[in-house]
Image (cartoon, rainbow, N blue to C red):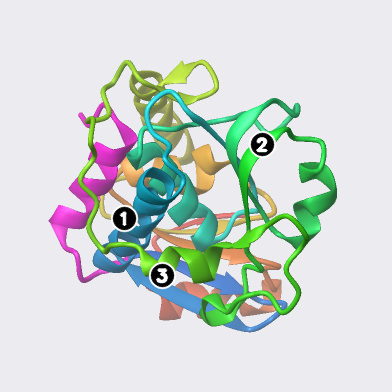
Amino acid sequence: MNETIPAALQAAVRRDPTVPLLTWYDDATGDRTELSGATMDNWVSKTANLLTDGAGLGPGDTAAVLLPPHWQTAAILLGAWSAGLAAAPTATPTPVDVLFTWPGGVPDAAGWPAGDRYATGLLPLAMPLRELPPGYVEYTIEVRGFGDRFVAPQPVTPDDLALGGITHADISGTAGARARELGITAGSRVLIDATAHPDPLDWLLAPLYAQASIVLCAGLDPSALAKRVDSEQVTLTLT
């Protein structure tokens, strides 16, 4: 069993780096983005390098990820965990070392005391924002300048914090249990309605630990569901 989130990601990449790990749909915009294990690992590595080399952060530091379910949210969360940061619970503002948000989250983010602040538009093709909120750095531009491989200065351990006061070992057990509860099994291709399952435990961690691939859908059009299940070879639907 993988006892840390970075270990679970690396296990997924090693199984077959070429197959889709996360496929993103936004039916409101028509956006479809597919990330293989290798491509997701690349984004995660760049994000981890941004946090360690760019922001000077590491184990013991905290990140607020005030973003809806999205493939970039997955890359940011996994990058933060790979760098040894703990993600802060999003319910109550608390001081953090780094904060990520999007235009819709800027008003809520204003209540969070934070060090570095990054914004992303969550736009197709990872396009940058046309208007950057004051006080923020554009994540999709900044992250591209960092390395494609990440070597942790200090390996993440099962006892390190991953989410608030919850350790990686705790998350590993919880994610495995949640996968069983949702019926996600190894090799599943699971379609997830992001509105119905906004918790990263459901749309990211449970499939990752179950060795499944993800089809994450925002603004899911019910009339498109049957065709998408067929075209994406979905074996499990969570709506």
Mark 2 highlights which residue?
Answer: 114
- Magenta stretch: residue 33 in it? no
The front one of 131 and 161 is 131
Q: Secondary structure at mark 1?
A: helix
Describe residue 201's horizontal placement relative to residue 179 as left or right: right
- Sequence-wise, the earlier of marks 2 and 1 is 1
Front-lying residue, 80 or 222: 80
Q: Secondary structure at mark 3?
A: helix
Q: Is 39 situated above or below 196?
A: below
Quadrant of residue 143 within the rendered picture = bottom left
Say which amino acid is labelled 3. Answer: Arg
Q: Residue furthest bottom?
A: 30
**Would you call the spot at circle 2 few (<14 residues within 10 Å), some (14-19), or many (20 or more)?**
some
State the extent of the magenta-drawn residues as a range.
1-20
Residue occupied by mark 3: 144
Q: CA distance from mark 3 to mark 2?
A: 23 Å
